Amino acid sequence: MSKSVAARGPTLVGMLLSVVAGVALIGGPTPSVAHHSFAAEFDAAKPLDLKGVVTKFRLVNPHSWLYFDVTDKNGNVTNWGVEAGTPNLLANKGLRKEDLAVGAEVRITGYLARNGGNFGYAVTITLSDGRSFQTGTSQDNSPVVSAR
């Protein structure tokens, strides 16, 4: 009288496949959780203080980005981009996406990017109604002392 396969319990092949799957899950490749440092991207010795008009606001992880047009004294317009905190951090501080709608006037204080481009790290965003928000977590205790 023969027993069915189901009644025999786990087979050697089945157990071997389970062990291989477990090892693959534990020891297999995992996504990297890399994060750049403030000092690698931005220069704490080069503060920025800019006023402009919002052109785009990307509320995304791991860092939000605000883009805005700055007009110099000669009327030349330059688009700038600044990195800010995570969407959750900004929401916890009371900053909403609607606050940074296209056309909104803003003042940004922070630090210039090391790459020499029109990019930086936002420490504070001040809206035209006077509300001001701390927008990042790096170098936030360092004073921004010069205007550009």
Image: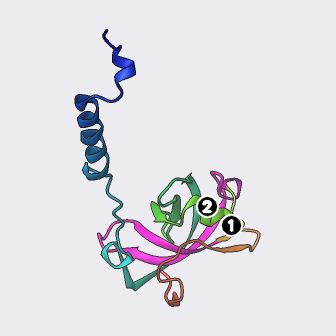
Question: Is residue 94 visible to us here?
Answer: yes
Q: Please report the bounds of the magenta region as a residue range.
A: 97-125
Amino acid type, residue under disc 2 in the picture: Asn
Decide which of 11, 89 is in the foreground and name it. 11
Cβ–Cβ below 8 Å for labels 1 and 2? yes
State the image quarter where residue 97 is shown.
bottom right
Dot 1, how many residues are within 10 Å of its Cα: few (below 14), some (14-19), or many (20+)? few
Q: Is residue 49 visible?
A: no
Please tell me in which quadrant of the rendered image residue 134 appears: bottom right
The residue to which callout 2 is attached is 88
Across and down, in percent, residue 107 comes to: 60, 72
Q: Residue at x 47, y 83 (%)?
A: 139
Q: Is residue 117 magenta?
A: yes
Where's the N terminus, which quadrant? top left
Q: Residue 54 appears at what percent x and percent y?
A: 59, 57
Residue pointed to by mark 1? 92
Q: Is residue 139 magenta?
A: no
Q: Is 2 located above or below residue 136 in the figure? A: above
Tag of residue 115: none
Residue 26 x/y as whole percent: 31, 51
Give 69 or 13, whichever is nearer the viewer: 13
Q: Determine whether the residue tagged by mark 2 lies in a helix, strand or loop.
A: helix
**Label 1: element kind:** helix
**Colour treatment of the image:** rainbow
The kind of residue tagged 1 is: Asn
Q: Is residue 5 left or right of residue 76?
A: left
Q: Tell me the CA gap for discs 1 and 2.
A: 6 Å
Residue at (52, 53) in percent of width and height: 60
Position in image of residue 94 (x %, y %): 72, 66
